[in-house]
Each structure stands twice: as structure tokens, then as C-alpha cells.
Image (cartoon, rainbow, N blue to C red):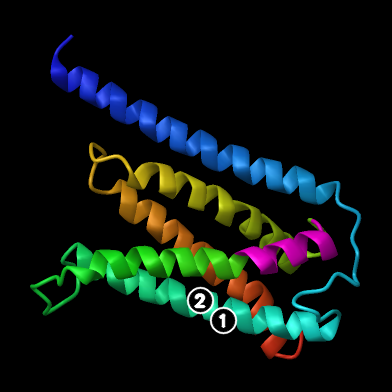
Amino acid sequence: MPSTVRRSSSVAVRLLLAAALAAAVTVALYVTGRHQTPDYTAELFGRSGAAAVRLKAWLATVVLGLAVVQLALALWMYGRLPGVHRVPRGVRTAHRLCGVLLFAVTVPVAVQCMRGYGVETTGPRVVAHAVAGCFFYGAFAAKVLLVRSRRLPGWVLPLAGGALVATVAVLWYTAALWYFNGYALP
């Protein structure tokens, strides 16, 4: 078998594995959330009710800011920032550390959401938020798997990273902006 055929089949297998992992994590979280009995008194760092919602809105805003920084660092790493030609050594490390921090901030929020609400389907905003929340962790798992592979086409990581940034934006819009706008989407 020629090496180009082996390489393309290896790439296809890696992409399928990443997609399967993303789907499995997303579905597992969705099913778990659908079977979760909501506990509307669930706390987040000692806050519950409206205080927990306010804290989650601010934490989600931090996550959105970190996602924008992640995007800028990725563009910088891959030479896609206009007018920037040199990439300092620390950019890759900063990108990784920012990603770890972004993920770490999402975990307590997601745990409180899952314990407090599960996956509810009471309206379009709630469904979009719940599905995006489940998908975020699936997409994150897939990106972690893909980032370790050096033999993937150049479009794969930008697509995975872009999906994560877009998902963070959807989560922020359907929760934090909804809260900041007086419990209504603009």
C-alpha cells in the first residue's frame, strides 16, 4: 500500500475518532442531564438562586474573554494576525495556559448547571444553551485529541478551535447576555 494511501486513511481514522469522541461526550452529557432531577437550590461557590445566576453570568463573561484571547493567540501562532510576522516563543505556552484556565473556569459553572437544571427543554433559548453546553465538552475533548496529531490537514485545528469559540459565544449569548439584558435575549 503506497504511503499516501496509508497517510490519508490514517488521517480519516483520526478525524473519525475525534468526531466519535465529540459525539460520545456530547450525547453522554445530554442523556445524563435529561435524567438529572433539577435541584434549583444547587450552589455555586456558596451562592444559590439569583446570586448563582449572577456569578455564572460573570464567569461566562470571563470565559468569553479568554476564548477571544485564545483565538488571538491561535491566529498569532499560525501567522494569521495582520501585520505580525514574528511569533515569540511564549505564545504557544500562553495559548495552552489560557486554554487550561478557560476550561477550569467552565467546570464549576457546568457542574452547577447540571446539578441545578440538568438538560431542560422548556424553550428555544434553554434548549440552545443546554445543547451548546454539552457540545462544548465534546468539542473540547475532540480538540485535545486532534492537537496531539501532527499529520492532520491544516484546516482541522482551526475548525476545532473555531467550533469551541463559536460554542462559547452561543453559551454566553444564551445565558450571560440573557441575564445582563434583564432575562431577555436582545
Residue topped by disc 2: 64
Foreground pick, 179 / 96: 96
Query: Is residue 156 within the magenta segment?
Result: no
Work out whether residue 72 or residue 44 is closer to the camera in this orientation and state it.
44
In the image: residue 77, left or right of residue 28: left
Residue at x 14% of width, y 70% of height: 87
Provide the major secondary structure of the magenta segment.
Answer: helix
| Residue 38 drawn at (x, y percent) | 89, 60
Relative to 178, does residue 158 appear above or below in the rendering? above
**Are the residues flagged by discs 1 and 2 in contact, CB closer than 8 Å?**
yes
- For the record, the magenta segment spans 107-118
3D distance between C-alphas at marks 1 and 2: 5 Å
Look at the image and tell me whether residue 10 can be seen: yes
Residue 78 to residue 138: above or below: below
User: Which amino acid type is marked by label 1?
Assistant: Thr
Residue 56 as seen in the image, left or right of residue 51: left
Circle 1 residue: 61
Residue 19's x, y, as percent? 48, 38
- Residue reaching furthest to the left: 85
Q: Is residue 122 visible?
A: no
| Mark 2 element type | helix
Count neighbours of disc 2 (C-alpha within 10 A) and say few if under 14, some if 14 to 19, many if 20 or more. Answer: many
Q: Compared with residue 70, is residue 161 higher up or lower down, i.e. above or below?
A: above
Q: Is 112 covered by the magenta stretch? A: yes
- Residue at image point 41% right, 70% down: 98
Q: How many marks?
A: 2
